[in-house]
Amino acid sequence: IVMTQSPDSLAVSLGERATINCKSSQSLQSNSNGKNYLAWYQQTPGQPPKLLIYWASTRESGVPDRFSGSGSGTDFTLSISSLQAEDVAVYYCQQYFSTPPHTFGQGTKLEIK
Amino acid sequence: EVQLLESGGGLVQPGGSLRLSCAASGFTFTSCGMSWVRQAPGKGLEWVSGISKNGGETFYADSVRGRFTISKDNSKNTLYLEMNSLRAEDTAVYYCAKYSLLGLHYSDNWGQGTLVTVSS
């Protein structure tokens, strides 16, 4: 499964909304349980990735509620409702549909405008 | 608190071998599958290999299949990655990651990584 993110980079003003898209080459929605097998990670400079969202829209414990995930099937979105300085990072989507390999998108670099 | 501590990285010549280790603590190691994810300098994340909680199932990316071997010692709470026939393109930071209790799905905790450099 190929994961494609857009855009590759994004500059947003503090307090404004940021939106990152992720498209999969095949549906990530299970016919048996309806869940979408997609996660979002945040990687700040010099740090390992951090899980933000799983099952496409479930926020990991401790993640601020300005982060939200949406979408289904092959098209997904990560939104940050009001950009903060600490949100500057590279964001990755990852599919975990069926058995591994669990491929990542190429990443989207988010900066402050 | 979950802790994952990778070790074993370093400089190795092309064609050489290296074994990475990941010491885990703060969770029930026998209840979770594990994975290795790498990141070449200035590049994105690449899933490398995964293993089920009991070690009975292993999975590999096409780029490393036949050269890398993942294993899990539940008595030592340690994950391993044996890397053979190393190539320049294997140069990367290698992260150890823990799958959630639900299975081989998303990774909810990551180590700090260990750098592997393949160069003559």
Image (cartoon, coloured by chain):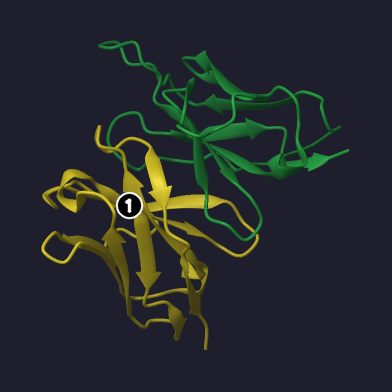
Chain colours: A green, B yellow
Task: Identify the residue shown where x is 45% and y is 32%.
Answer: A61
Tag 1, which chain?
B
Q: How crowded is mark 1: few (under 14 residues within 10 Å), some or many (20 or more)?
A: many
Q: Looking at this view, name the residue that lies furthest to the bottom.
A: B120
Q: Looking at this view, name the residue that lies furthest to the front.
A: B1
Q: Residue B28, percent across and down?
A: 20, 49
Task: Identify the residue shown where x is 45% and y is 81%.
Answer: B10
Q: Looking at the picture, which amino acid does disc 1 mark? A: Ser
Judged left or right of residue A80, residue A57 is left
On screen, residue A44 above or below B75: above
Q: Residue B108, percent across and down?
A: 39, 42
Task: Identify the residue shown where x is 44% and y is 40%.
Answer: A103
On screen, residue A37 above or below B117: above
Which quarter of the picture shows residue A38? top left
**Residue in the foreground of this view, choosing between B118 and A86:** A86
Q: Residue A47, percent across and down?
A: 58, 57
On screen, residue A100 above or below B9: above
Q: Can you identify the residue that label 1 sits on? A: B35
**Residue in the foreground of this view, choosing between A83 and A71:** A83
Exactly how many numbered labels are in the figure?
A: 1
On screen, residue A95 above or below A33: below
Identify the element where label 1 is drawn.
strand
Judged left or right of residue B93, residue B57 is left
Judged left or right of residue B46, residue B26 is left
Q: Residue A28, percent across and down?
A: 41, 21
Q: Quadrant of the N terminus of chain A?
A: top left
Q: Quadrant of the C terminus of chain A?
A: top right
